[in-house]
Image (cartoon, helix red, strand yellow):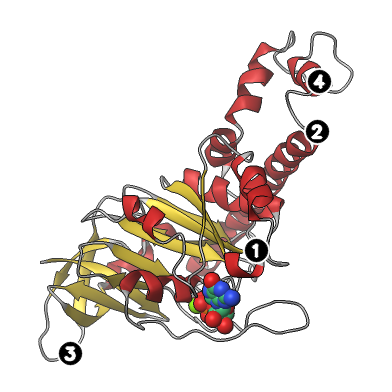
Amino acid sequence: MTGRISEVRKNSWTIHYHEEELPAKLKGSFYEEEAELFPVVGDYVNFLYNPQGDSVILSVCERKGLLKRPDQAKAGVMQYMAANVDYCFIVTSLNRDYNYHRIARYVSVALQGGAVPVVILTKADLCDHAAQYVEEAASISEKVRVHVVSALYGSGLDELKVYFTPGTTICLMGSSGAGKSTLINAIAGVEIMKTSGIREDDSRGRHTTTHRQLIPLQNGVSLIDTPGMREIGMAETEEGIADTFQDIAVLERQCRFSNCRHETEPGCAVKAAIERGELSRERYELYKNLGAENRRNYAKKKEISKRVKAAKKFMRKNGTDWE
Ligand SMILES: Nc1nc2c(ncn2[C@@H]2O[C@H](COP(=O)(O)OP(=O)(O)OP(=O)(O)O)[C@@H](O)[C@H]2O)c(=O)[nH]1
Ligand SMILES: [Mg+2]
């Protein structure tokens, strides 16, 4: 049987199958695989049904895409967030939460994961200059779409209907308190997710949503709610960054020297574009920084996996079990 993962908790999975939520565990051989192959929310899985207790997940169907980021707590380890996402709603509220650089990070992660990035600026009712933010967010990438909504007053929600076609999966990501769960409730028309107020002093949320969850709606759309993220790092995001900043990647190919660092080299197309005012220096710096962070994290991951491999080899040789 094939179902879809709707929730993942420590060592327990939930499969959505024909209007039912089935508890499940993994087949033992998964534990010999790479972490990337473990089922995540949004994955389609083949499973053995057990009406009395845990069903058994046998395999993960081929993914269309995977949203991932470096684990904040464990250096060199990736966190796999959601699979088979069509649209990534990057939810940012129009208060102190709004951050151009952070949105660019989400955009890179979405593109890397095969999802179309859609920036949703929420709490429009609290802001009188939303147009300025729309323009700025749209300038992040040609690939980005931007919408302004107020879930509280229901404004702007009609515009989102273009994304609600049967079979579509939408993952909402953003800071705690940005209004992801409130938006889900507004889209669904019923109170599915718990929401709660933000702190008055710094506009931050209270981490109300604590785990990722897939919510299949009546209209055939699946929404994925996620817990608020403090930060979103770059790792294994090379193509996503190149996609986000495609205009810069094109310029780089026009430099006289193929290894141009865009510093003092003659015939540099990037510097020329900045001088002509066609490329903002801030955006170029952001591109450079995200790329450097991505390379640093890659090096870290490689180093750590080398150490883990060596430790496993040592333990096997000495007859000690790993874990
Ligand atoms: N004024 C206003 N408040 C909103 C709007 N959308 C959400 N809020 C409020 O913002 C607060 C946080 O909303 P949540 O939906 O819980 O935020 P979240 O992004 O799910 O947060 P986490 O689950 O912690 O990641 C709640 O008090 C909501 O009522 C809006 O459009 N306008
Ligand atoms: Mg929430």
- Give the side of residue 117 with respect to residue 98, left or right: left
N-terminal of the pair, mark 4 or mark 1, is: 1
Give the crowd class for mark 1: few <14, some 14-19, many >=20 residues within 10 Å: many
Circles 3 and 4, Cβ within 8 Å, touching? The answer is no
- Name the outermost residue toward the bottom: 52
What SS does tag 3 mark?
loop
The amino acid beneath tag 4 is Lys
CA–CA distance between discs 4 and 1?
33 Å
N-terminal of the pair, mark 1 or mark 3, is: 3
Question: Which residue carries the number 1 mark?
Answer: 94
- What residue sits 76% from the left and 19% below the top? 273
| Nearer to us: label 1 or label 3 | 1
CA–CA distance between discs 4 and 2?
9 Å
N-terminal of the pair, mark 2 or mark 3, is: 3
- What residue sits 26% from the left and 61% below the top? 221
CA–CA distance between discs 3 and 4?
63 Å
N-terminal of the pair, mark 1 or mark 2, is: 1
Question: Which residue carries the number 4 mark?
Answer: 271
- Residue 209 rendering spot, x and y as whole percentages: 49, 81
Label ID, residue 49 = none
| Nearer to us: label 1 or label 2 | 1
The amino acid beneath tag 3 is Gly
What SS does tag 2 mark?
helix
- Give the side of residue 62 with respect to residue 92, left or right: left
Circles 4 and 2, Cβ within 8 Å, touching? The answer is no
Question: Which residue carries the number 3 mark?
Answer: 53
Can you tell which quarter of the image residue 160 is in?
Answer: bottom left
Give the crowd class for mark 4: few <14, some 14-19, many >=20 residues within 10 Å: many
Question: Which residue carries the number 2 mark?
Answer: 281
> Residue 103 versus residue 310: which sits nearer the camera?
103
